[in-house]
Each structure stands twice: as C-alpha cells, then as structure tokens.
Image (tube, coloured by chain):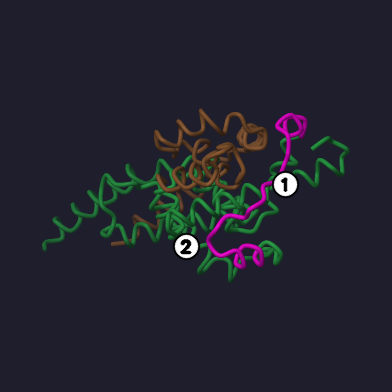
Chain colours: A brown, B green
Amino acid sequence: MQELVGKHTQDNSKDPCCEDCSKCIEIVNLILDCEANQEQVAFFENNIKGCNKCMTHHDCYQSIVTKLKEKQDKKCCPDAIMSAIKNAIDEKA
Amino acid sequence: MSDMTTSNAKLEKDKLFQSEFMPYIDPLYNFAYRLTFDEDDANDLVQETYLKAYRFFDSYQQGTNAKAWLFRILKNSFINDFRKKSKQPAKVDYQEVESYYNSEDTPQEHTIDLRSDTVQHMMGDEITNALNSLGVDFRSIIILCDLEGFTYEELSKILDIPIGTVRSRLHRARNLLKEKLKDYAEKRGFKS
C-alpha cells in the first residue's frame, strides 16, 4: 500500500488532490475499512479531505453502511436447526 | 484404543466444537439467508456447514479464526454444492460479470456520484434491495466486510482470493451498489 500513496503523490505533484480520483477512492475505501496504514491516513487527512468527489464517496458510503446496519434484520438460527446439528454430531461415533 | 478412551476423546472434541463454533451460528445463518433468500435453504446450508466443520475438525487449529473458517466453509458449500440443488438458482447479472472480468484486476476509473444526504433520505429497504440485487460475489463481499466486519486478510481467506482482489472487488461492489442507488434516487426525483 506504500505504493498506492507513493504513486499517487508522484503522479499529481502539482495538485495532489484527485487528478486521479480512482486511486484516492481506493485509499478512502481503506480508511472506511480501517485498513489504511499511517501514511495513507496522513495522505487522506492532508489531501483527500479537500476533494469533494472523494469526500462525497466517503460520506455517501458511510451513510449506506449505516442504513444497511440499521435495516439489517438480524435473524436467529431456529432452535430446531441447532438441535438437528447437535443430534447429528452426537450420532457420529 | 479402548472404548472408554474413544468415548472420552469424542466428548472432548464435541465440547471443543461447541465452544469454538456454536457461538457463530446466528451470523452464519444470516449470511446463509442473504445468499439464498430462503429460510429452508438457509437452514440446510447452515446444517451442512456445521457437519462439514465437524467432519474436518481435525484440520482446524484451535484458537485460530473459527468464525472465518466457518464462513469459508459456508461460502464454498453454497458455491460448489448448494447452488446446484437450490430451489432458487442464483441470478446472474451478465452486465456486472462482463464489466468485472473485462476490467481484470484494476479498479474501474470512474466512481459514482451520490450524495450522502440523498442516501439518508432513502428508506433502508431500498438499500437492502439494491444490495440483494448484486451478483453473489459482490453481495458476499459487502456483507462480509461492511456487515460482518471481517478484515481484508480474513476476507482473502474466506473468499480464497488475494488481498489485492479483495480491495478491487470491494471497490467495484460499492460502486455497483451506489450505481443502483443512484438510479433509484433519480427515478424518485432525488438530487443525486
């Protein structure tokens, strides 16, 4: 991931923010998933935050995930299935 | 080995199996349901997963990531065995597949613009429907990452793909989801 930041900074030395948004958005995705390293976090904080397109992606995707989680209908596995699994395991000698 | 020793070993194995694997039955059931969209199919898939896990329990290293291991078994069961005999065959969006495979392993250049406040005005159902309309690979990665909270490394093991592919598939899946929501927003007259 060093490469991702390095390449982007080099390619966009005049205007580091988002001549190539697809690279930035990869970093935004890493930030959203808590997978970014320190260098990428710093890059995000210094550069991408100033780019509307990338911030729109960040905020929009965060809203989607929040909505998905709110709406997520968490089902419980039926007791009958748990019993069937336990019985099948007990039967295996 | 005497009968008593065999029986003690089985008791020990069953105890370990219970404590390591059974706590994940609800998240697994939810994942199975989101793959199959059918309660009976989800029930069968979960049972099949646990029985396979029990059968191959000796190859599981105690204390490692039991949840990821189970999800991997479930996903493989769904792809390899279950989908063939399922009542509802998986829907394939050929346009998605085409753009996915034609673009190799690099993310698409464009991203979809959709405003966060537009998303906030949507009903959650629209987002769930948009997610459910994605192809199984894209749907799975969003569920596993955004809803189940697996790391990229875990996703790589569960889905049996390199981390780079996890990143690019996630990128495409999110873009497709946003594209579907953007279409929805435009049809409903939201400003996207």
Q: Position of residue B181 (x, y in %)?
A: 75, 44
Q: CA distance from mark 2 to mark 1?
A: 24 Å
Give the residue pinned by disc 1. Answer: B129
Give the residue at x 77% y 44%.
B182
Image quadrant holding the C terminus of chain B, namely top right
Residue at mark 2: chain: B
Taking the image as shown, residue B18 lies to the left or right of residue B99, namely left
For the residue pair A86 and B150, the one nearer the viewer reads as B150
Q: Position of residue A41 (x, y in %)?
A: 46, 32
Q: Quadrant of residue B116?
A: top right
Res B76 label: 2
Q: Which residues are magenta?
A: B97-122
Does the image show residue B25?
Answer: yes
Give the residue at x 51% y 28%.
A45
Amino acid tagged 2 = Asn
For the residue pair B93 and B30, the one nearer the viewer reads as B93
Q: Position of residue A68 (x, y in %)?
A: 64, 37
Image quadrant holding the N terminus of chain B, namely bottom left
Above or below for B12 versus B6: above
B129 magenta-colored? no
Amino acid tagged 1 = Asn
Q: Quadrant of residue A55?
A: top right
**Residue at far left of view:** B1
